[in-house]
Image (spheres, rainbow, N blue to C red):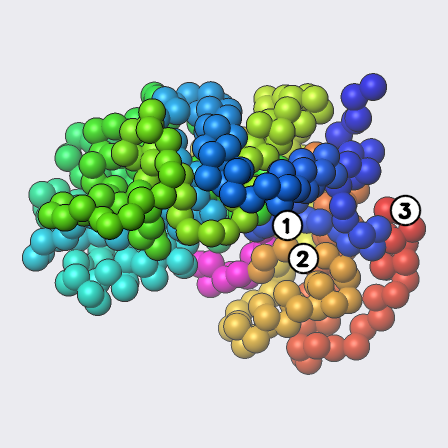
Amino acid sequence: MKTKFGKPMRKHFLFQNSWLNMNHGSFGAIPRCIRKCLHEKQDLVESSPDSFIRFDYAKHLLESRTAIATLVKAPVQSIALVPNATTGIDTILRNLEYSRGDYILTFSTVYGAAERTALHLSEVTGVQIANIPITYPMSDADILLLFLATVQNIGADQIKVAVFDTISFEPGVRMPFEALVQACRERNILSCVDGAHCIGQIPINLESLDPDFFVSNLHKWLFVPRGCAVLYVPPRNQALIRTTFPTSWGFTPRSTICRCQFQQSSDQSAFERLFESVGTMDYSPFLCVAEALRFRKQIGGENAIMLYNSQLAREGGRIMAQILGTDVLDNAESTLTRGLSMVNVQLPLHLKRLPGKETVDWICRTLVSEYHTFTPVFIHGHKIWTRVSAQVYLELDDFVFLGHIFKDICDRVKGGVVGGNSDTKSLMLGKTTGLC
């Protein structure tokens, strides 16, 4: 019998009874059967390391690449697996060659690691960074207009690459990435789509989207073990990606022949071989993609999972905002939350009366240490927000409970002393009992 979504689904996961996992978006979580698969793959390596790593690993990797290529509707020859989205974005940006006057175009909501890669490249290559400031709520049309105005101001021929999200991390909102990809294509700007939160949360069709580069974590929303991400590079751009980071066996120098080689597949393209072996590490998470997709199919399939999560996020966020007397972050067209498994709820705190950074840090630490849960808390548009993730093992009662947790925390903050001594034992006792 198929397990119902909500509390019954928790038996498939590994959480402590006292832990309420409301932040699936940051690091993901794997079902028990996927952990079993992970251990089996590790045992397979350990049973005969040389045999597996040198001669068998490539065919297992191809199975995973084929599975994810089918899901995202892309040719398998355009798919590589990397440890995380940060590695993928870093690999793309560091492979591009920059000339004097070139720009990397980003938004102010760019992920911190991607921003730092761009800033480091600015230091070592001289490429300039143009950062488009956005403060939500904004319409998709206004975001696109800001992008086009920035391109016009700089000159499209000076912009080497534009980096933007499918779903930004803080706040967790959907960007008009489809329109941005098209705008880049029409102006001969390389589009680098950071889909870290994409696969498993919203549908994606890379054949129709046709970005120049695309990266997405698989360990966040697809139930693949950490760390595993997909790097998509269509054939037209694969010559631009000459090395992995760190550079390893797949790199082919332009002017010499390397002294030694490592056994690699002879029937695959240079791009595929490039990512086949990038130093010795545990590649077992890469080999669990097909099993993760099988699990998702068994519990209802991609559409059912995404529908449940998006509806839960929408209704759960509304209830939390009602408890707190605040708002959910969205625009008039409701496109910021469209189809998402995450929701951003404003906290009833006024930054003018509080030390912002210290308050956010205290709330985050208190959530873990006293309430045995966590959701990212951040400042955006001079307000304090929390980003909450829906997932198949959660239900509305969990959002109600989290709303009351934040009400208690915010009351303590308003009391004037960050890190106050309000009693949370009775609140936690009721929730812990409910989880057992």
Q: Quadrant of residue 314?
A: top right
For marks 2 and 1 on the same chain, the one whose residue lies earlier in the sequence? 1
Residues in magenta?
Answer: 378-391
State the CA–CA distance, disc 2 to disc 1: 6 Å
Q: Nearer the viewer, residue 61 or 386?
A: 61
Question: Horizontal and vertical percent for residue 56?
Answer: 50, 32
| SS assignment for the magenta stretch, majority | strand
Residue located beneath label 3 in the image? 436
Disc sitting over residue 374 in the figure: 2
Disc sitting over residue 135 in the figure: none
Q: Are marks 3 and 2 in contact (CB under 8 Å)?
A: no
Q: Nearer the viewer, residue 18 or 415?
A: 18
Q: Secondary structure at mark 2?
A: loop
State the CA–CA distance, disc 3 to disc 1: 20 Å
Whether residue 165 is visible here, answered yes or no, is no
Is residue 2 within the magenta segment?
A: no
Q: Secondary structure at mark 3?
A: loop
Relative horizontal placement of residue 163, taking residue 129 as reference (left or right)? right
Question: Horizontal and vertical percent for residue 88?
Answer: 38, 46
Location of residue 143 with respect to 300 vertically, above or below: below
Name the amino acid type tagged 1: Asn
Name the amino acid type tagged 2: Phe
Q: Are marks 2 and 1 in contact (CB under 8 Å)?
A: yes
State the CA–CA distance, disc 3 to disc 2: 19 Å
Residue plotted at (21% across, 67% down)? 123
Residue located beneath label 1 in the image? 23
Q: Nearer the viewer, residue 15 or 395?
A: 15
Q: Is disc 3 surrounded by few (<14), some (14 to 19) or many (20+) residues within 10 Å?
A: few
Name the amino acid type tagged 3: Cys
Mark 3 or 2, which is nearer the eye?
Answer: 3
Whether residue 15 is visible here, answered yes or no, is yes
Relative horizontal placement of residue 58, taking residue 182 as reference (left or right)? right
